[in-house]
Image (tube, grey):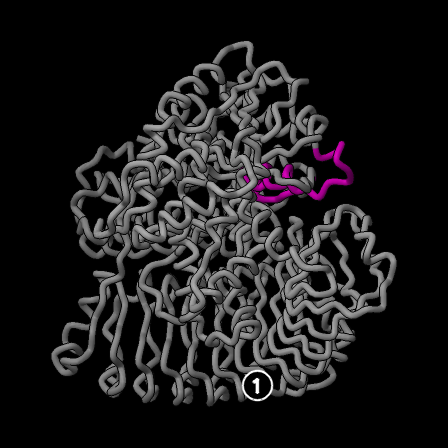
Amino acid sequence: MASASLVGGAALGPAFEKVFSILYETVKDVITTTCMFESILERLKSTIDVLEPLVNEIRRSNRELDRPEEVIKGLIEKMEEGEKLVRDYSKLPWWKYLMRYRYAKKLSKLEDALCLFFGLELPVLNTRNVLETLKGVNDIRARMNLVGLNGGLLCAIPAPPDFPVGLDFPLKELKLQLLKDEVSMLVLTAPGGCGKTTLVKMLCHDKQIKGIFKDNNIFFVPVSNTPNLKVIVQKLFRHKVDQVPEFFSDEDAINQLEHLLNQIGQNHSTFLPTPAPQNNPILLILDDVWSGSESLLEKFAFRIPNYKILVTSRTSFPRFSFTYKLKPLNDEDAMVLFRHSATPQDGSSYIPGGDTVKMILKFCGGFPLALKVIGSSLCGKPEGVWRSRVMEWSNSDHSFLSSSTSSDLLVCLQRSLDFKDDEIIIKKCFLDLGSFPEDQRIPVAVLIDMWSELHELDEDGIHAIANLHEIAIRNLANLVVTRKNVSAVDNCEDFVLQHDLLRELAIHQSSLEPIEQRKRLIMDISGNNLPKWWTEQRQQPINAQLLSISTDDVFSSSWCNIQPPKVEVLVLNFQTKNYMLPEFVDKMNILKVLVVTNYGFFPAELGNFQILKSVPSLKKIRLEKISIPSLCKAPVRFTSLKKISLFMCNIGQAFRNYTIQVSDIFPKLLEINIDYCKDLVEVPTGLCDIVCLKKLSITNCHKLSALPQGIGKLRNLELLRLRSCTDLWELPESIRSLHELSILDISDCISITKLPKHIGALRNLKELHMEGCLRLRSQLPPSILDLEQLKLVICDEERVKLWESIKELHPNLEIKVAEKDINLNWLSNHF
């Protein structure tokens, strides 16, 4: 090849720089000039983005590398082949997904080869710079692969359990049975709350299992009570293929999945002229499968060599031959888990001995969920409370857990909801969690919006977060914090997970009163089977302040009438491609918060949006996976709206073709949040006319390359968050006009190379977040000294150097190094 003659010695040489540059320009050109938004191209571009400074450093140092010439030559050849692969990949039609899968695998290998080359084969470079750059690549790859913040669109292995107890022996038994040659499908069964999912998480992280199936060939899919087969298959495709097909039917989805799994099982080698089929075992885990789903399971039972299915269910499914029954914990293990849950972290609290704890353990019946929840509810309580609870339980008519059923466990868990008078708000917040579908992540930002209106908590979410921590401490839900170093008012990416039994408990507690008197009305609708009381069309108004309606993928949006005059928060969860807002919304005169979430795979069309013009008090709207342009055909004037949040929505040409100004549509809008909207290339200029805006957050929008100059017109803006917009290459100079701006966040904007020349004009700036700005290496502009109100800068170690001289002149300025662990474990499979 031509590249061979251009390589001299063991230096990179002009050939490397040229091919590296051509590859980069090709990737950028394909992404920009086509509709290719696939993660592999975005990842490859971002990888080259953050590696480019290292190439420049090598060129400037003019050093020879202590590596063989053929290693450099081989990488040049791979990059030359990669440039052709990118061009060919962009021309493939979406339906040739198997071919796209093979190309994507090759491009992924090229990306890994680049990272390995720079991370492991350049010891002459500054080690901190190399590690920092590779950490940046690692973070970007992880975020781009974690597209499914809501429910997990990828089928990745969940994190290992925090404190597993008594599962070592069951793990050995389960693994032994699963790996038998004759076992293709194994059902792990036990009552709810017995630890089935915990055991499966341990299995996924078992060294032997990971060695056999590899991380990338273990698929973990929550199924739940209302499974959508096409969405399940689309999640499996998305785990392996960039372009996910839209299936015509369930049969079409299953047929195409079988083809994909066959392709994965063959494991064609990449970068070889003739791919060589190899054995590649596959493990599909279907978690939380409900009774009556035998036909669903049979559809996944393909005759593929070394393909196994592990099912977790409360039902044993006699139709299938191989079952493993998980038993409750024995007394010894139950005591360990209970003490762990009942003891404060500082170990200061006294735990009564003798019959008191024995009675509690008997009451919990060895169920891990009950032990954790009951233990947490008693944590820190005086001995008198413990004895009082035991006496109350022992006098109950129920024979707790005598039959080890989930209904008995619900009775047990119900006893943990004893809150003091000053803690009733925490119980209300827990009950509100039942408004969201089973096995789905609940965004903290949504809860803050709801609770600020329902329970009059603060808008910034400080009290809401405190309540969530208390709920988590009681083991009634899990609060997952996704990022460190965020300010108190920034919880936009955090979420809550809840066990399905605890959701059932919340719904049960909310349903004790007659329908018309309930404060929160939660409905899960299957098909078009509306509740009987609703179809009778009673004219008596409901008393609910919170109304939640969840529908499945066959719901036709055929609504019956309802009288909801007191509803303040409306939560609509759906799965269909087209969804109509119900007509009864126009009777919600005091509706303040609307949350519409599409749990299908692709963005949906939302109809009847214009009915919101009849809702005079609406303050906050959150839309998830909605096609926004369809809403703009007949714009609605929101006279009271203060906040709008768009998550994973298609923006397209929205807000650009209005016949009236955007500021007239949103005359009182204070906050805009846009997150993971992958087709957002530029911010609509009309948004810059909303001069009352105080918070603008655009995060994880990897196509956004620039902000409009008109952003300087947002004279009341107090917070500008642009985190993880990886293509954003600069901030406009007009930002100098944002005199009220107090928080600026450009974290992980890896393409930004400099701060605005006149950034010092931001006289009220108090916090600057700039960790992960890997290409920002030049000196800070002199005007930075004018930021007299600046109190906190959060950055990485490399950027700290830029602030050393500033710190000397501003001794009260805190320079905080971001807490990010350098973790190169993702490279270990390639050593």
Instruction: Determine whether 200 is above or below 812 in the image.
Output: above
**Residue in view at x 37 percent, y 45 percent:** 375
Q: In the drawing, does residue 831 fall left or right of residue 741?
A: left
**Residue in view at x 58 percent, y 30 percent:** 313
Q: Position of residue 764 (x, y in %)?
A: 33, 87
**Residue in view at x 50 percent, y 60 percent:** 427
Identified by mark 1, the residue type is Ile
Instruction: Determine whether 636 is above or below 556 in the image.
Output: below
**Residue in view at x 17 percent, y 80 percent:** 812
On-image quarter of the N terminus: top left
Task: Say which residue label 1 marks.
Answer: 690
Front residue (pair 278, 408):
408
Front residue (pair 778, 807):
807
Q: Position of residue 636 (x, y in %)?
A: 73, 79
Q: Position of residue 552 (x, y in %)?
A: 72, 48
Identify the residue at the far right of this view.
536
- The residue segment tinted magenta is 230-253
